[in-house]
Amino acid sequence: MKTIKNKFLKSTYTLALLLVVVIGCDREISNEAVLTTFSNNPAVFLDGFSSGLQYYPFGGSKLEAFSVDTQTKYQGTSSMRFDVPNVGDPTGAYAGAIFRDDNGGRNLTKYDALTFWIKATKSATINEIGFGQDFGENKYQASLQNLRVSTGWTKFTIPIPDPSKLIKESGLFWYAEGPENGDGYTFWVDELQFEKLGTLAQPRPKILNGVDKVEQTFIGSKVVVNGLTQTFNLENGLNQTVVTAPGYFEFTSSNPSVASVDDLGNVTITGTGTTKITATLNGIEAKGSYTLESLGDFTPAPTPTQSASNVLSIFSDAFVNQPVEYYNGYWAPFQTTQGQDDININGDNIIKYSQLNFVGIQFTQPTINISDMSHFHIDIQVKDQMQSSDYLIVRLFDIGSDNSFGGSDDSSAELRLTPTTLSTGNWVGYDIALRNLTTLRGKNNLAQIVFVSDATITDILVDNIYFYKVPTAPTVAAPIPTKPAADVISVFSDAYTNIAGSDFNPNWGQATVASQVPIAGNNTLKYAGLNYQGLQLGSSQNVSGMTHIHIDYYSANSTSLNLSLISSGPVEKLKALTVPTSAGWSSIDIPLSNFLPVNLSDVIQLKFDGNGDIYLDNIYFFK
């Protein structure tokens, strides 16, 4: 503070001299001018609230969890009492609050720890206790996690990671604790104050929990340096580790042209190449580093086209996702997989799994009922070079009506992906009809999606995980054609003049029910209960000057659909179409060469065969 004060006075005095010279004013700055200072009162709660201290409970917590107790105390006349609620308590799910100095904050630079005495009505593990939360930036938050407390008074020490930062700290104390095994209990805190112990030794800061992490990434990606801690050796010889806010650290990128890192540990990838993110805390190099290899520009997965009203999403920026407990459960002791939903590239959130052997996404609070859905979709990009024996299993797991794992009504089904369908460095989308997952007996209580590779494929990107249903009939019209009319011979389309006199329902003994229906004002062919269906052209057509036939088709329930061209003779050749159309209308341009040996100068009929209900539009030849 003294250095800052002197600099302030020096610059003020220089400005005063300039004013004298320029405007002839002989007024001088008072020798009593000083910087604004803040209270250095170390007390938070001794026998009552210290000056300016206010209580602010967290949202969703039991508002009346805190009280001042004059009966139970470590010493003096009173203590802080905290009543943790039972599971199901209507007044709050947990106990949690901050205690803030509303007099403008305090200068705590002369202290090195927050200390307090604590006891409880039973042995318990308190989730978190610390300081630095102020419902603002929380820039210098620090805390102890999983405090083991007993029925006797015990003193705890929370070391300040770097006291020089706490020039104006208003977040003097905070805590968060839930029921123990469903039951609430009470704990007390007394003699809560900041102290200058002078006995804290061997500071050992860490980033990324001390791990030297290496990842590939892309331009536009944003990652956060987490796992921030500071460890001190206490006077009793024990080590005490505090979870530390990034504001205490100074972060550095070894190659700023590849990535920048701000004072909160947010890393932004800006170029191609490799950089290493490191940090120091109070001049001491932190253990752990983040080496990032930027591969350049990133191509996102295709944007889903399903209507949100027909989707149950697990992970996608295109939809509102269902509640998910985690995207990586870090299942000990055998899981090696790292990563989760923590990659953001140009605003696109991505799941990135590395060192993959197996990993699970879990959603049991609540489970998801997919019984009304028809398909499962997922986009996957493999980053490894693959061998022919490599594989990736995607498994869906339903826990049945008892809503618990391990019951007799559990069921699962899996999709086994191999290098024949996966692609290194490219997104591949999979749309799986749920009716084909015959071993997934239950669909009312889906709880997990599990990925298994047994380390044959170790690095993947995942996006757009969702279930959806295909409406039995399209709700929007087929896309409007854009080909010039001069380049088109149209069979059926509102966009062109069609071949005159065509019969769209000739009597060929078919079981198909043919009709024409309006879809969003557009005339559309409907073939219900298709087995086969002919289309007799009004006259023989010479399409040898055309190059393709175009067709828009839609089916939610077909598993087989073929289109045949027929010339006199008859000579016919079919082309299989992909069904069902899982993403709405499918538009296809088929080269006419695919239909040889049909005589393209004498095409007289078209035929569709397969099953299900089919909607057709914009059937035309073009060049």
Image: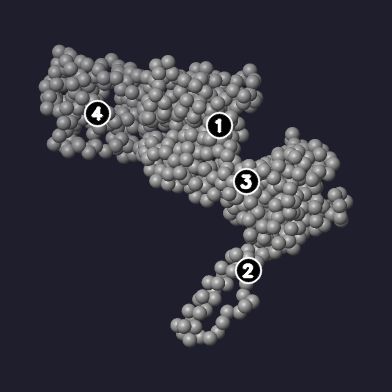
Query: Which of the two residues, 65 or 126, is positioned nearer the viewer here?
Result: 126
Residue of label 2: 36
Q: CA distance from mark 2 to mark 1?
A: 48 Å
Q: CA distance from mark 4 to mark 1?
A: 42 Å
> Judging from the image, what secondary structure is the residue with disc 3 in?
strand
Q: Which of the two marks, 1 or 3, is nearer to us in this view? A: 3
- Badge 4 vs badge 1, beta-carbon distance below 8 Å: no
Badge 3 crowding class, 10 Å Cα cut-off, few under 14, some 14 to 19, many 20 or more, is: many
Q: Which mark is residue 328?
A: 1
Query: Which of the two residues, 4 or 402, is positioned nearer the viewer here?
Result: 4
Badge 2 crowding class, 10 Å Cα cut-off, few under 14, some 14 to 19, many 20 or more, is: few
Give residue 35's position: percent from left, percent from top.
61, 69
Q: CA distance from mark 3 to mark 4?
A: 59 Å
Residue depicted at 73% across the width and 54% down the height: 196
Q: Which of the two marks, 2 or 1, is nearer to us in this view? A: 2
Residue depicted at 49% across the width and 83% down the height: 20
